[in-house]
Amino acid sequence: MITEETMSIDRMENVIDVFGSFDENLRLIETELSVHVTDRESELKLSGDVENVALARRAIEGLMTLAAKGESINSQSVRYVIGLVRSGEEGRIGELARDVICVTAKGKPIKAKTLGQKKYVDAIQKNTVTLGIGPAGTGKTYLAVAAAVAAFRAKAVNRIILTRPAVEAGERLGFLPGDLQSKVDPYLRPLYDALFDMLGAETYQKYLERGDIEVAPLAYMRGRTLDDSFIILDEAQNTSREQMKMFLTRLGFGSKIVITGDETQIDLPADKVSGLKEAVRVLEGVEDIAICRLTGADVVRHVLVQRIVEAYDRYERSRQSGGQGNGQNRNKRGGKER
């Protein structure tokens, strides 16, 4: 059933912010929800299917709330708000008007962009150890580095330590040019990139030379006790169970640990247990340790990244359900043969 609904607008400048330059956000709302929106002085007219018009009205109201609080509206935030409205969570849209975690070297404020990211950032601030688990593009590493820089600037910690396992290197390290640090640098590049963004190359280099920042492969952590430090272990799905236990026991007084990883991107040999997977099982419910799971809804890169993540999730679920069925059939046949 086609219907038309009118929305009264108090501040038209908020509408301009919501609709975006050349009404690109408006076009996205219309496409996503199959409605037509026209702007008439201090009113908006929405036409389309009854249910879609209701969704569009709630989405626009939510986006206007964010715009009124000074949040910039882009295609990613429009899609995310529409997703919240569709799932009946529009009451939480106001939570997306977030506090700034950190300001980059170029003056850009870093904030959590989704409810999942907000929960993750809150967990980092409240707990000594936080595990952030989720697919590519959910901001696990970037937000952890932002929190580390914020803590360092506030003098809550004396240094930042960033580490990750160089699993992909293996025996091939010897074929790379340079000393050991040069050989492992390519595997630490995502951590460098995040630090350069937050601090700027010159400031980063100054802190590095003073020992205030350390970026090193996980093997360098053995035998150390890390006090007054903000320590981030990235790509933790590629740690062995022994490496994960070793890393967790490096925690010293006044320190904070963030462990990030994606359980769907394990590069370990098939016979090796992922230290991240085991840590999630072992540490669940331990006081002062938070386990945060980010999902495809928290992807803040190009919209195609979210679609790719969802497509792989669907494929993996169908493959596992098919494999389980085949395994059961084989077991039954095996029982008859015996």
Image (tube, grey):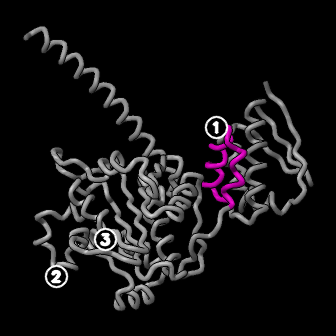
The first of marks 1 and 2 along the sequence is: 1
As rendered, which of 332 and 12 lies closer to the eye?
332
The image shows residue 179 at horizontal and vertical percentages of 16, 82
Residue at 29 percent across and 74 percent down: it is 225
Q: Nearer the viewer, residue 187 or 245?
A: 245
Which quarter of the figure is the N terminus placed in?
A: top right
Mark linked to residue 188: 3
The reply to whether the C-beta atoms of the residues labelled 1 and 2 are less than 8 Å apart is no
Judge from the rendering whether residue 131 lies leftward or rightward of residue 180; answer left or right: right
The residue wearing badge 1 is: 87
On the rendered structure, is 142 left or right of 243?
Answer: right
- Specify the segment rendered in magenta: 73-97
Check disc 1 and give the amino acid type: Ser
Inter-mark Cα distance, 2 to 3: 15 Å
Q: Looking at the image, is 336 positioned above or below residue 252?
A: above
Q: Which residue is mark 2?
A: 179
Please say whether residue 210 is one of the residues in the magenta stretch: no
- Which residue sits at x=59%, y=75%? 108
Amino acid type of the residue that numbered disc 2 sits on in the rendered structure: Asp
Q: Which mark is residue 42?
A: none
Instruction: Classify residue 205 as left or right of residue 199.
Output: left
Q: Answer whether residue 137 is visible to the viewer in this image.
A: no
**To which quarter of the image does residue 315 belong?**
top left
Residue farthest to the left, as pictured = 338
Predominant SS along the magenta part: helix
Along the polypeptide, which appears first: circle 3 or circle 1? 1
